[in-house]
Amino acid sequence: MEKTKTHPSFRIDEIIAALILLCIFVDVTLQVVSRLTPGNAIFWTVEVGEMLLAALIWMSVGPATLSNSHVRFDLVLLKMPPKARKYLYIFGNIIFAFFLVLISVILVQLMDFYKNHNTVTTGLQWNKFYVRIPMLLGCLIGTLRLLVQAWKFGTGRLPIPIEQSFSAPAGGEKGGA
């Protein structure tokens, strides 16, 4: 089976997501161990876990774009002619990118409010401005990835994913076990 390269070399969001996942593992381990020893529960592990989970979700927007794991209406797209599919994929990416830019603009305003009013988290008293940075990074990187992917769909450098997903195996291979 031939493997095509669809991922760009720029993978900062994947690296950050992997580091966040490692931090979540350490955080959960600390939480469990501290709960097993009476009177030694570490109060901040729950708050840090919530922040890390939110950061992981937002840092996964870019990798989800690369692997075409974000939401699309593939059953509707299958009914369309191939040329229409291509344009709908491009349009869908642009709309999703616009949505992420809109979220980013609103988020920057919110982060400005947090910074100016010194809004802090409950337990650790960290300024929420810093807690929201992964969300902003995820939106910006996701936007960039969506627009690059739309460009590649439009120029034919990247095949439309639905055509690969639902096409018959090449070379007469049979599926099944």
Image (spheres, grey):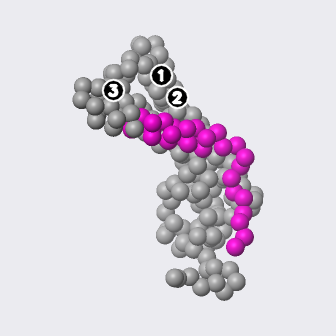
At 38% from the left edge and 20% from the top edge, which residue is drawn?
124
Q: Which of 22 and 74 is in front in this view?
A: 22
Identify the amino acid type marked 1: Phe
| Label 2 secondary element | helix
**Residue 35 appears left or right of 16:** left
Task: Find disc 3 in the rendering and name its residue.
Answer: 42
* Marks 2 and 3, how far apart at CA: 25 Å
> Which quadrant, please, contains the N terminus?
bottom right
Q: Can residue 36 be seen in this view?
A: yes
Q: How crowded is mark 2: few (under 14 residues within 10 Å), some or many (20 or more)?
A: some
Q: How crowded is mark 1: few (under 14 residues within 10 Å), some or many (20 or more)?
A: many
Q: Give the range drawn in magenta.
A: 1-28
Q: Which of 174 and 32 is in front in this view?
A: 32
| Label 3 secondary element | loop
Q: Is residue 139 above or below residue 93?
A: above
Identify the amino acid type marked 3: Ile
> How many numbered discs, if any?
3
* Marks 2 and 1, how far apart at CA: 7 Å
Q: Which of 172 and 32 is in front in this view?
A: 32
At 51% from the left edge and 59% from the top edge, which residue is drawn?
72
Residue 87, numbered label: none
Task: Where is residue 8? Give x, y as percent.
Answer: 71, 49
| Label 1 secondary element | helix
* Marks 3 and 1, how far apart at CA: 24 Å
Of pointers 2 and 3, the one earlier in the residue sequence: 3
Q: Is residue 111 visible?
A: no
Residue 133, numbered label: 2
Identify the amino acid type marked 2: Ile
